[in-house]
Image (cartoon, rainbow, N blue to C red):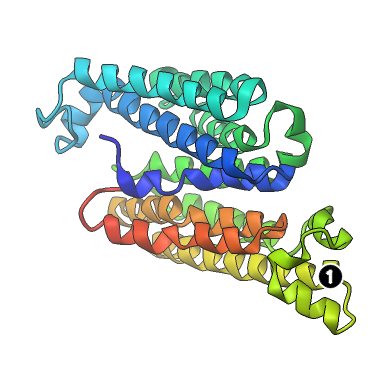
Amino acid sequence: MVRAPAALSVPGDAIAGAAAAGRLGPRTAGLAAASVCLYWAGMAANDWADRDLDARERPERPIPSGRISPRQALGVAAGLTAAGVGLAALAGGRRAAVVAVPLAGTIWAYDVWAKNTAAGPPVMAACRGLDVLLGAGSDRIGSAAPAALTIAAHTATVTALSRREVSGGDSALPAATLAGTVALAALASGRRAGAFPAMASGRRAGAFPAVANGRRAGVPPGEVASVWGGGVSTALAAWYAVWYGKAQARAVADPSATRIRAAVGAGITGLPPLQGALTAGAGAPVTGLILAAAAPLARRLTRWVSAT
């Protein structure tokens, strides 16, 4: 019911938001954990809300198969929601709680109302955008807004595809989402304006050997950090485009339910490289690389647990 491959795509939201806001630190781990709890809550609530539909279309799901009762699923969803909001408040204080509460409300609104309406993709996109802002805090929304919009747009493409993962469709939908993926990769790659302020001042040069080396060679530390972070960001954005784009290209050629479901899975498991690209571009290339490493692990886990 709470699917591990999909959960690996979640911590990077808060981390990318914190990086964009200049707030990466010990508290970020607590906010990432809060994000995972809220995401798992949404999965449980989704299974509860879709139990009748799943009985017809996907009887292998936990509730139709009898592995868990509707009441248990609802209880898990409620408990994880409370845990997520509570963890956010503990880790980030009021500025995180102010974002966590509407995030939790948007998740539940998607599951019980919006999912099967025209509002579904934008509401789900709003969930992931708010998740990014959770890492930044309510007082630095402007700084994290570009990252939040990027993750939200990616989520909209995955959600749009997911509506055809049972019935299949035509080539127009995966072609459109593929174009969006290429555009997002281009936007996420390279150095972002305003990144590396601490590097430019030299206050944290010791944190990155390349910066220290650049100083000895007479190269301004900020420039070396910018090249390093920008290069990592570009590489990770390209990885994201290939990872998700290949699956969508196959769906364009064959828009069957199987191919579209595979594209949805690739969109879920391939999100960490995009989050890593945004994080690296905001001045934390090593953290960005660590985030991106979750993608191969998520793919491996899909051999045993479905991502969708």
72 lies above or below 265? above
SS for callout 1: helix
Q: Residue at x 81, y 55 (%)?
A: 198
Give the quadrant of the N terminus: top left
Q: Residue at x 56, y 43 (%)?
A: 13
100 lies above or below 302? above
Q: Nearer the viewer, residue 199 or 261?
A: 199
Left or right: 296 with respect to 90? left
Q: Nearer the viewer, residue 55 or 104?
A: 104
Identify the residue under disc 1: 221
Asked whether residue 245 appears in the rendered view, the answer is yes
- Percent across and percent down for residue 67 are 11, 30
Left or right: 145 with respect to 101? right
Residue ranking furthest to the left: 66
- Percent across and percent down for residue 39 are 42, 33
Residue ranking furthest to the bottom: 217
Q: Residue at x 56, y 30 (%)?
A: 91
Q: Nearer the viewer, residue 308 or 3?
A: 3
- Percent across and percent down for residue 106 are 52, 22
Q: Residues within 10 Å of mark 1 (few under 14, many from 20)?
A: many
Residue type, numbered disc 1 = Pro
Q: Quadrant of residue 237?
A: bottom right
Asked whether residue 168 appears in the rendered view, the answer is no
Q: Residue at x 51, y 36 (%)?
A: 30
